[in-house]
Amino acid sequence: MGRKSQANGIGVGHNSTLTDDEKRAMTLHHKRAYEAADSLVEKAKADRTAVADLAKADLGKGALADIKDMIIADSDKKMKALLERTMRLARWAGIPVGTQSSLFERVSDPFEDGKTAGMSGDKCEPPTRLAHDHAQIWIGGWHEEQTILASAFGKKRAPAKPAADGQIDLSERKDLHEATA
């Protein structure tokens, strides 16, 4: 993530007129500051590891996950996003929201299972345990997902056309500008 040049010309590379000795001096100066900051980071990581180990010893295996979730719960916006994501993933996994998924054996929906197989790139081969009519439903789900997948790939941005001389003009790639901004 580079910094943008300011209007007064001060920004990345503005010191290009420095002599070699001046660059060396500034590099050593920044090296010392970076080492100091790096040691603070290492100390903080060691402290966090110690706290995590203590929490695991006191509360058991899931302690760290609970602590992280409690930190997320402090922010309504983050908690809402986490719940929405969890419900979406449960729906995608075929687990009806509002049910206890492990109380009994999961009730399988062959159509949804076929869709999931199609999204995952699996072959159109329904499980052998399915009865013939459920296998046909599974295949219908697989084919529907292939149609949806083809449509989604069609909506993706078209690849950049190569220049006449075979060179690619990277200035038109917005994703590269966002990554470096």
Image (cartoon, rainbow, N blue to C red):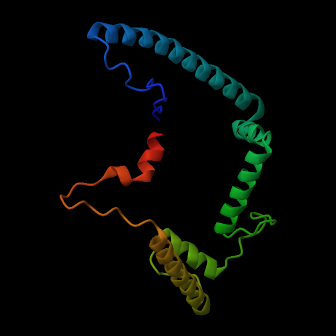
Q: Which picture quadrant has residue 95?
A: bottom right
What residue is at 74 percent from the left and 41 percent from the top? Answer: 72
Taking the view exactly as shown, the residue that stands out farthest to the front is: 8
Q: Horizontal placement of 117 versus 80: left or right?
A: left
Q: Position of residue 14 (x, y in %)?
A: 38, 22
Q: Horizontal placement of 154 versus 114: left or right?
A: left
Q: Position of residue 89 (x, y in %)?
A: 66, 61
Taking the view exactly as shown, the residue that stands out farthest to the left is: 165
What residue is at 73 percent from the left and 46 percent from the top? Answer: 78
Residue 22 in view (yes/no): yes
Q: Which picture quadrant has residue 26?
A: top left
What residue is at 59 percent from the left and 84 percent from the top? Answer: 130
Q: Horizontal placement of 95 versus 150: left or right?
A: right
Q: Position of residue 138 (x, y in %)?
A: 57, 83
Q: Position of residue 22 (x, y in %)?
A: 33, 8
Q: Which picture quadrant has residue 15?
A: top left
